[in-house]
């Protein structure tokens, strides 16, 4: 499943390619056909990411919207495990596979295959969606205090809390392993055992790493001072410190692998302490 930086990257790229354009919206597969007819011919205000959720905001059919325009229609996309976007130059090729949605702008088009969720939302449903999503380190309006209040009151392991999208939005399995490793926090440390100082470090590092991921469109957690080539040229093995590693990159100790919150966790129990 894509982590938050990938979803924000899609939102950014789709805004650059399609915002303020009157879009043709189709559903070659047919499963979004009724909804596509409701928004086809409208102007796309833009796209926003909330953690791993994408929202497309639509204006009227008669004129291009202002940046702060209130949406006339709202489309929600969650890619899940199998969702995928394909970008095309116009005219787009024949649909490939089960294309749930095809959107055609003035110069480019994109297809969406296999999303977990793709539907139109009422304004009330949109508010409900935003309210159930946790603080997103990539959003300027994120409130880390909300995440802190949930974490400090919880006896769940921090390794599980970081995957809970109602606590912190956008962090997935790779980022949680790498963030906890870089901070020296054992994944089984209870949320209520974290100090405020440690939480602030965790939040700041989450913001930093997700911003790097957004910039380079890949997860990179190594320290720049430890490498001698551009970040854009790093291999997958060079980009990460502990995820899917057999040995710790700091001490050489064997990396432990076990399940935390039903996902495989990677940690060095020599370098990562249990209590912050």
Image: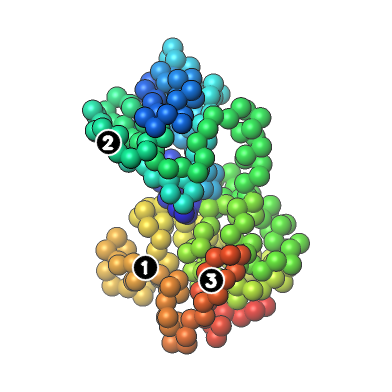
Q: Position of residue 92 (x, y in %)?
A: 25, 31
Q: CA distance from mark 2 to mark 3?
A: 37 Å
Q: Callout 1 environment at 10 Å: few (<14), some (14 to 19), or many (20+)?
A: some
Residue of label 3? 265
In this view of the protein, can residue 76 be seen by the observer? Answer: yes
Q: Position of residue 6 (x, y in %)?
A: 42, 50
- Vertical comparison of 166 with 45: above or below: below
Residue of label 2? 88
- Please state which of residues 113 and 171 is positioned toward the viewer in this rendering: 113
Task: Give the secondary structure at mark 3.
Answer: strand
- Vertical comparison of 4 with 77: above or below: below
Label at residue 239: 1
- Vertical comparison of 145 with 184: above or below: above
Q: Residue at x 58, y 44 (%)?
A: 141
Q: Taking 272 as reference, is 58 left or right?
A: left
* Quadrant (top left/top right/bottom left/bottom right) for the C terminus: bottom right
Q: Residue at x 69, y 61 (%)?
A: 151
């Amino acid at each position: 499943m894509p982590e938050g930086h990938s979803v924000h990257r899609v939102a950014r790229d789709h805004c650059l390619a399609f915002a303020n354009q009157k879009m043709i919206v189709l559903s070659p597969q047919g499963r979004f056909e009724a909804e596509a007819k409701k928004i086809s011919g409208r102007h796309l205000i833009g796209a926003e990411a909330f953690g791993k959720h994408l929202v497309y905001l639509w204006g009227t059919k008669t004129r291009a919207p202002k940046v702060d325009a209130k949406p006339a229609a709202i489309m929600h996309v969650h890619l899940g495990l199998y969702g995928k976007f394909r970008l095309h130059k116009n005219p787009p090729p024949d649909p490939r596979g089960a294309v749930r949605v095809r959107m055609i702008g003035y110069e480019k088009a994109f297809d969406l295959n296999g999303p977990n969720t793709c539907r139109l939302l009422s304004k009330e449903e949109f508010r409900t969606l935003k309210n159930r999503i946790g603080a997103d380190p990539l959003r300027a309006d994120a409130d880390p205090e909300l995440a802190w209040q949930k974490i400090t009151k919880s006896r769940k392991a921090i390794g599980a809390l970081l995957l809970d999208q109602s606590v912190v939005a956008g962090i997935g399995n790779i980022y949680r392993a790498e963030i906890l490793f870089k901070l020296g926090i054992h994944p089984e440390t209870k949320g209520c055992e974290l100090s405020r100082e440690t939480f602030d470090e965790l939040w700041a590092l989450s913001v930093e790493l997700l911003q790097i991921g957004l910039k380079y469109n890949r997860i990179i957690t190594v320290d720049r001072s430890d490498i001698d080539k551009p970040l854009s040229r790093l291999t997958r093995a060079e980009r990460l410190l502990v995820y899917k590693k057999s040995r710790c990159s700091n001490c050489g100790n064997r990396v432990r692998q076990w399940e935390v919150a039903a996902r495989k966790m990677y940690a060095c129990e020599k370098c990562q302490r249990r209590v912050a």
